[in-house]
């Protein structure tokens, strides 16, 4: 029997190649994801370990400390340096300052002092040297590229009074991963003396120490505890490393889980391709299998022979998939590196291969292939020996739409999915609603897969009515000849398109809603914001803006945090009274937002309900009572909207300025001219940045498009596998219909018409899968939009027809490509040789 199996594999190698590629792609995604996860984990561990390297003891404020805002006392550094067993100690501190780039505009920068102990420097020098003098500085590699600065250039930092301090850049460095380095700000290292010129106030968040030779880490910790007293957490270097790496493990695991979910989709699609392939092969080998039964092979031997072919295919595909997975991982790492920042050094490409990855690759490839081949193998055992004595028409079971058992199972799955959707939509919180409803849509998708043979016929007939010409009509007849086969072929594509369409619809709905919110909330023509949080825009600057030509009104925005006995956390947003309701709008439960008095608040509806408040109630903020005159559905204003004087009165420190100024132009003003005037006006402030609603929308669109591009890329592999399935089905159908094609040629069908017939057949199958997928994706997208919408934030359902149209167009183009080789092969077959088959 082994010789028979090997001979069969040699004879059908070409037929199994496309199926092997489908499985290889699925395995490549799985192994690539595992390799990527290991690479991300290794890289992030290295980065985090950099902050703990050479550290023998670390001092932090305890969680229940009452002095967390001020940090560790600065004089502790000298105490720890003088402690027995300490070879060196340094404070880790940072402060915020404004960095002037080459465009003379400021950005947030975190400024750190250079540790005096070389071993305790948690960054690697890349070029030049570290600063020694008070007027020298080093910048990290990302800052150098973003701010367009290099070694030898002058660096300007602004202190709290906007006074400039010049430094000479003497080096660049690469950071490890820490709360400071991942803040999103630019980073500068100066000498301890240089730091005091820009940031006089010292805020130490950590003190690290190195032990002398012969002193253990625990002994050092005990010595330090005795010196600094209670109220502080002192860790050994090993404990610090372990704690940071535990945090990293979770992050790497989340990335791996998300990618594995998409890999699972690809494997499901690949499994369907394999199932379809073996179903067709078994149907084509009816006479061969019957002859085996005639010469003495029993059912179990036939079953094992088909599964043996599946095992061989799975092993071969797994080898290719594991090798391909390295390329997938390298591509994903390059993508992450490009998205994460301009410096490729921050995320070098690594390809760690573990035995777990190799075992997973072979396990997934072989198991998916074998499981997909079980049902066709079982059908092979049902071939009667007498079948060897007759021709091989399509059996009634092959051409039947579906059976009663399948319909009953599909109905049960639909009921379960429907109940899960209802349960998900009843959830008040967005996260459980999203997960439950999302899972329910996948259950409904499974039911639709079971019902595939029922709907492919009518949809094919509908498309067929629009076709003209003999080749196209023949193609429609071929596509509808075997509903089960067509359903299995189109199902793989349908899954991928459904998920892409669903994500696209949800993202498109979110995009439209956010753009409407921008228009509704800010009728202002422009916003002037401070690009540096610690450097707000002063009142004098706001007054100067009001004098700009064609500016009708300037409304400052002020956010104030405060305390309330009725709320766990409170902060309000203040505007001038005459701007509320005109320049500032918000949807309320009591009608349009009107002008407020200084003792009134338009309160967030959710917080009001949680505190048992309603319109007419009073809420205590910062020791003052505010009357609730409206309930705001929007959560963008914090606890609520108050007047500018009221927000100013809630500040703990004197008002320094505003983070944002809303600018309203005189009606009929030329926007281009007005922008040029405003640009000239804000040039006097290094921190002022001009934005418009259009620019805000463009930024939102860019972020959403980037997410969609990543999702499309991940699901794209499943779509490629599905198209391989269509190509595979057509290739096997060409072999199966050799005599039929020859007969059509004998009746007058030209080679070109035969090729056209197969191309149209491929397009029909792609359209069936794509159209059903788009319809399901749109429906499932609506369910998800309903699930994550609530009274406070209602998402408007929107279908991005342009992107959906592009998807359908790509499906047609891909179908034409998939049909190219099968059509060429069919046209090359000899009419005489074809008629002799069968």
Image (cartoon, grey):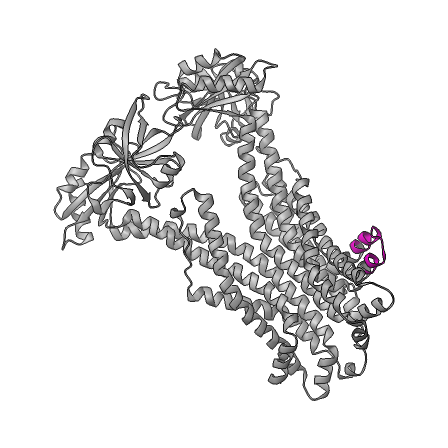
The one of 774 and 149 positioned closer to us in this rendering? 149
Q: Is residue 462 magenta?
A: yes
Relative side of 65 to 247, left or right: left
Pick the quarter of the image with the N terminus: bottom right
The one of 7 and 356 positioned closer to us in this rendering? 7
Q: Could you say where residue 510 lies in the image, as x and y percent from the top left?
A: 59, 37
The chief SS type of the magenta part is helix
| Residue 244 appears in view | no
Q: Could you say where residue 556 lies in the image, as x and y percent from the top left?
A: 46, 18
Residue range in magenta is 459-474
Q: Could you say where residue 267 lies in the image, as x and y percent from the top left?
A: 58, 61
Q: Is residue 155 magenta?
A: no
Residue occupying the point 57% across, 74% down: 312
Relative side of 119 to 179, left or right: left
Residue occupying the point 54% across, 12% down: 550
Which corner quadrant of the image does residue 117 belong to?
Answer: top left
Q: Could you say where residue 188 lies in the image, as x and y percent from the top left?
A: 31, 35
Q: Hey, which residue is sitting farthest right in the picture?
A: 747
Q: Is residue 167 above or below residue 455?
A: above
């Amino acid at each position: 029997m082994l010789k028979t199996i090997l001979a069969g594999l040699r004879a059908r190698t070409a037929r199994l190649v496309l199926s092997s590629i489908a499985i290889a792609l699925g395995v490549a995604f799985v192994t690539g994801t595992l390799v990527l996860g290991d690479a991300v984990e290794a890289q992030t561990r290295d980065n985090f370990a950099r902050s703990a390297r050479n550290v023998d003891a670390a001092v932090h404020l305890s969680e229940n400390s009452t002095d967390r805002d001020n940090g560790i006392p600065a004089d502790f550094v000298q105490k720890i340096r003088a402690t027995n067993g300490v070879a060196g100690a340094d404070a880790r501190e940072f402060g915020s300052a404004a960095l002037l780039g080459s465009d003379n505009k400021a950005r947030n920068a975190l400024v750190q002092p250079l540790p005096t102990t070389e071993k305790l420097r948690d960054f690697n020098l890349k070029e030049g040297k570290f600063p020694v003098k008070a007027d020298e500085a080093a910048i990290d590699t990302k800052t150098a590229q973003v701010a367009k600065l290099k070694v030898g250039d002058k660096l300007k930092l602004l202190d709290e009074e906007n006074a400039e301090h010049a430094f000479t850049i003497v080096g660049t460095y690469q950071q490890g991963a820490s709360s400071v380095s991942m803040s999103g700000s630019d980073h500068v290292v100066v000498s301890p003396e240089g730091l005091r010129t820009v940031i006089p106030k010292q805020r130490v968040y950590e003190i690290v120490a190195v032990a002398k030779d012969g002193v253990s880490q625990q002994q050092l910790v005990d010595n330090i505890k005795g010196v600094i007293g209670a109220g502080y957490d002192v860790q050994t270097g090993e404990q610090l490393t372990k704690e940071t790496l535990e945090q990293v493990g979770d992050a790497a695991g989340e990335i791996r889980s998300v990618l594995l979910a998409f890999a699972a989709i690809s494997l499901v699609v690949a499994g369907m391709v394999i199932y379809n392939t073996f179903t067709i092969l078994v149907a084509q080998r009816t006479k061969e299998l019957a002859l085996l039964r005639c010469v003495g092979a029993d059912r179990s031997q036939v079953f094992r022979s088909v599964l043996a072919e599946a095992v061989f295919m799975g092993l071969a595909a797994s080898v290719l998939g594991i090798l391909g997975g390295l390329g997938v991982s390298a591509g994903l790492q390059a993508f992450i590196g490009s998205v994460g920042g301009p410096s490729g050094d921050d995320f070098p490409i690594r390809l760690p291969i573990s035995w777990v990855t190799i075992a997973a690759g072979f396990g997934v490839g072989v198991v998916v292939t074998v499981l997909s081949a079980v049902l066709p193998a079982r059908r092979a055992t049902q071939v009667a020996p007498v079948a060897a004595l007759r021709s091989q028409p399509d059996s009634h079971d092959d051409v039947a739409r579906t059976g009663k058992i399948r319909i009953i199972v599909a109905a049960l799955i639909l009921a379960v999915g429907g109940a899960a959707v209802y349960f998900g939509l009843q959830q008040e919180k967005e996260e459980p609603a999203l997960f439950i409803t999302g899972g329910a849509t996948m259950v409904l998708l499974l039911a639709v897969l079971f019902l595939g043979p029922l709907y492919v016929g009518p949809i094919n007939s509908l498309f067929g009515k629009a076709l003209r010409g003999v080749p196209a009509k023949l193609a429609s007849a071929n596509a509808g000849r075997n509903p089960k086969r067509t359903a299995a072929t189109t199902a793989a594509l349908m899954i991928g398109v459904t998920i892409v369409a669903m994500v696209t619809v949800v993202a498109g709905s979110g995009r439209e809603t956010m753009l409407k919110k921008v228009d509704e909330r800010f009728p202002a023509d422009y916003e002037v914001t401070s690009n540096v949080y610690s450097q707000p825009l002063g009142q004098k600057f706001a007054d100067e803006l009001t004098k700009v030509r064609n500016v009708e009104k300037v409304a400052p925005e002020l956010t104030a945090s405060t305390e309330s006995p009725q709320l766990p956390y409170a902060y309000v947003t203040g505007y001038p009274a005459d701007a509320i309701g005109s320049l500032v709008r918000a949807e309320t439960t009591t009608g349009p937002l009107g002008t407020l008095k200084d003792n009134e608040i338009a309160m967030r509806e959710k917080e009001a309900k949680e505190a048992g408040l309603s319109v007419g109630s009073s809420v205590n903020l910062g020791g003052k009572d505010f009357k609730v005159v409206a309930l705001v559905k929007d959560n963008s204003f914090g606890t609520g909207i108050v007047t500018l004087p009221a927000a100013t009165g809630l500040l703990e420190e004197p008002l320094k300025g505003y983070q944002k100024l809303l600018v309203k132009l005189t009606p009929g003003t030329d926007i281009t001219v007005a922008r040029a005037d405003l640009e000239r006006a804000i040039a006097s402030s290094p921190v002022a940045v001009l934005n418009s609603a259009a620019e805000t929308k463009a930024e939102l669109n860019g972020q959403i498009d980037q997410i969609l591009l990543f999702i499309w890329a991940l699901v794209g592999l499943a779509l490629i596998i599905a198209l391989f399935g269509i190509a595979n089905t057509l290739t096997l159908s060409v072999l199966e219909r050799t005599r039929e094609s020859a007969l059509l040629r004998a009746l007058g069908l030209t080679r070109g018409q035969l090729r056209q017939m197969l191309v149209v057949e491929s397009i029909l199958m792609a359209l069936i899968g794509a159209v059903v997928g788009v319809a399901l994706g749109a429906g499932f997208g609506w369910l998800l939009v309903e699930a994550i919408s609530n009274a406070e934030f209602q998402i408007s359902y929107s279908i991005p027809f342009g992107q959906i149209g592009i998807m359908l167009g790509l499906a047609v183009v891909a179908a034409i490509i998939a049909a190219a080789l099968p059509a060429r092969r069919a046209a090359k077959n000899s009419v005489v040789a074809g008629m002799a088959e069968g």
